[in-house]
Image: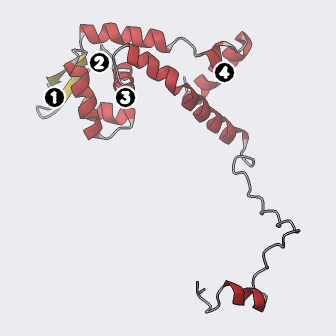
């Protein structure tokens, strides 16, 4: 193989620009250690990484809950976020969930097929459709919220003082 300076590997070794490979009785030099990016985190950064790790570790548990209710994770999230007393337009729902509008259409389609929501025309804007939770949707939503409020084992096994402290810190972080 020709290197950009015109010398192949053997020629570069002879020229002294590359260390020779270790002999049969020599140990290779240890690879330079790479800095662990998480080692230099401040407390807030580490907390954020830990919250992400906790969420990811609980995905199977969360998916089992949504599956037992016949919902996909995105559909469950949307139904959970919808307020039965306050219809929202599709754009608001997309913004609230940080989803693209085209993704919300599929979610609302699936919820509507199950009879959990319905689209109604907006009185203020004829072009807009409001997403309204139906009575069946409200029933499933209550079950979903009740199941989601059951702490996963990793949180349930914390002592009560730690559970209260964690709750209070998260409330402050969310401004509640």
Q: Residues within 10 Å of mark 1 (few under 14, many from 20)?
A: few
Q: Residue at x 48, y 21 (%)?
A: 62
Q: Which residue is mark 3?
A: 74
Q: Residue at x 51, y 27 (%)?
A: 59
Q: Earlier in the sequence, mark 4 or mark 2?
A: 2
Task: Determine the residue located farthest toward the right in the rendered image.
Answer: 25
Q: Which element type, helix, strand or loop, lies under badge 3?
A: helix
Name the quadrant of the C terminus. Answer: top right
Name the quadrant of the N terminus. Answer: bottom right
- In whole angstroms, how far apart are the C-alphas of marks 1 and 2? 15 Å
| Residue 47 locus on image (x, y percent) | 67, 35
Name the foreground residue: 174 vs 150: 150
Q: Which residue is mark 1?
A: 124
Horizontal placement of 63 versus 124: left or right?
A: right
Q: Which residue is mark 2?
A: 86
| Residue 36 locus on image (x, y percent) | 72, 51
Q: Residues within 10 Å of mark 2 (few under 14, many from 20)?
A: few
- In whole angstroms, how far apart are the C-alphas of marks 1 and 4? 42 Å
- In whole angstroms, how far apart are the C-alphas of marks 4 and 3? 26 Å
């Amino acid at each position: 193989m020709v290197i950009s300076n015109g010398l192949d590997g053997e020629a570069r070794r002879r020229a002294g620009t590359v260390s020779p490979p270790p002999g049969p009785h020599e140990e290779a030099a240890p690879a330079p250690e790479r800095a662990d990016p998480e080692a230099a985190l401040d407390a807030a950064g580490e907390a954020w990484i830990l919250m992400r790790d906790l969420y990811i570790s609980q995905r199977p548990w969360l998916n089992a809950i949504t599956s037992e209710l016949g919902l996909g994770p995105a559909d469950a999230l949307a139904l959970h976020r919808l307020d039965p007393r306050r219809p929202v337009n599709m754009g608001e729902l997309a913004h609230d969930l940080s989803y693209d509008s085209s993704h919300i259409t599929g979610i609302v389609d699936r919820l509507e097929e199950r009879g959990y929501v319905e689209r109604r025309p907006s009185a203020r804007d004829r072009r807009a459709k409001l997403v309204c939770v139906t009575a069946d949707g409200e029933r499933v939503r209550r079950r979903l919220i009740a199941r989601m409020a059951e702490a996963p084992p990793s949180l349930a096994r914390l002592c009560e003082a730690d559970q209260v402290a964690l709750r209070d810190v998260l409330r402050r972080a969310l401004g509640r």
